[in-house]
Image (cartoon, rainbow, N blue to C red):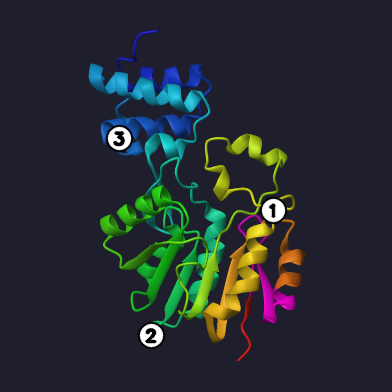
Amino acid sequence: MPPPDSVAAALLAARERGIDRLDAQCLLSAVLARPRSWLLAHADEALDPQAARHYDALLARRAAGEPLAYVLGEKEFFGLRLEVTPDVLIPRADTETLVEWALELLPCNVETAVADLGTGSGAIALALAARRPTCRVTAVDASSDALAVAERNGGRLGLAVEWRLSDWFSALEGRRFALIVSNPPYIADGDCHLDALTHEPQRALTSGPDGLAAIRHIVASAASFLTAGGWLLIEHGYDQAEAVQALLGVAGFEHIATRHDLGGQPRCSGGRCRD
């Protein structure tokens, strides 16, 4: 089938491949560097053959099941447009629950040390740095490829974050933070939901038979890296809140609570380190 020769033909080609209309518009907008509103008003506009071939190639990737964010190479999170590659998880709106909770705990115009564990694309760290520019944000990841993506995002956005290659706390010895946040892997090995996530890095998704291995490690270790009265906030699976709260309690945290995501699911739990 030849590449489409007009905007209308391009969107029709996407529909014939079973691709969602919004996804098709996003892809065509990216290729043409035009807003979606322009597409709607210029259905008869001719497509340059090179642009048509580029669009057709992107359609093929999306039709093969590759997530839209990876096809586009970017994803918006908390008002920031971030580069994403298959080396990092795609930032999700539910994680904004964690950011909002963290911002409540970080006073404005106060220099506060914050750590983001398993930063991936840098989404959480950069969102906090953007909203609390006086904070000293340190973000770590065990993947050098993921950290490279995060660093590029920070540089492009002009946000000051210290990026460190680290297996959780290993590169943070001797340091203390008023707030530690993390969106660690929390899906159980072999979980049926993994079938829909095959394009994303599995090491950033799974964490042992019950999905709690990384969370156990973080909770058990965090007090040694928190200031007195410091907070630990962790994103987790919709059915893990009770288990995570129990882990926090055993580790001696107080004021333990859980926040719900946009869909009403328990998504983040946290607690305060004793003074």
Residue 56 falls inside the magenta stretch:
no
Q: Toward which corner of the image does residue 113 lie, by quadrant? A: bottom left
Q: In the rendered structure, which segment of residues is drawn in magenta?
A: 248-270
Q: Secondary structure at mark 1?
A: loop
Q: Position of residue 248 (x, y in %)?
A: 70, 74
Q: Toward which corner of the image does residue 273 lie, by quadrant? A: bottom right
Q: Quick check: 192 above or below 259?
A: above
Alpha carbons under labels 2 and 1: distance apart: 36 Å
Mark number, residue 4: none
Q: Are marks 3 and 2 in contact (CB under 8 Å)?
A: no
Q: Quick check: 124 above or below 224?
A: above
Q: Looking at the image, is mark 2 or mark 1 earlier in the sequence?
A: 2
Q: Is residue 54 visible?
A: yes
Which residue shows up at 39% across the image and 63% down it?
A: 164
Is 124 on the left-hand or right-hand side of 195?
left
Which residue shows up at 57% across the image and 80% down it?
A: 224
Which residue shows up at 64% across the image and 65% down it?
A: 217
Q: Which residue is the site of mark 3?
A: 38
- Answer few, some or many: residues within 10 Å of disc 1's Cα (few below 14, many 20 plus, some between 14 and 19): many
Q: Which residue is the site of mark 1?
A: 211
Q: Looking at the image, is mark 3 or mark 2 earlier in the sequence?
A: 3
- Please identify, in this view, whether the residue under mark 3 or under mark 1 is nearer the observer: 1
Can you say which quadrant of the picture contains the C terminus?
A: bottom right
Q: Quick check: 261 above or below 90?
A: below
Q: Position of residue 18 (x, y in %)?
A: 53, 22
Q: Amino acid at mark 3?
A: Trp
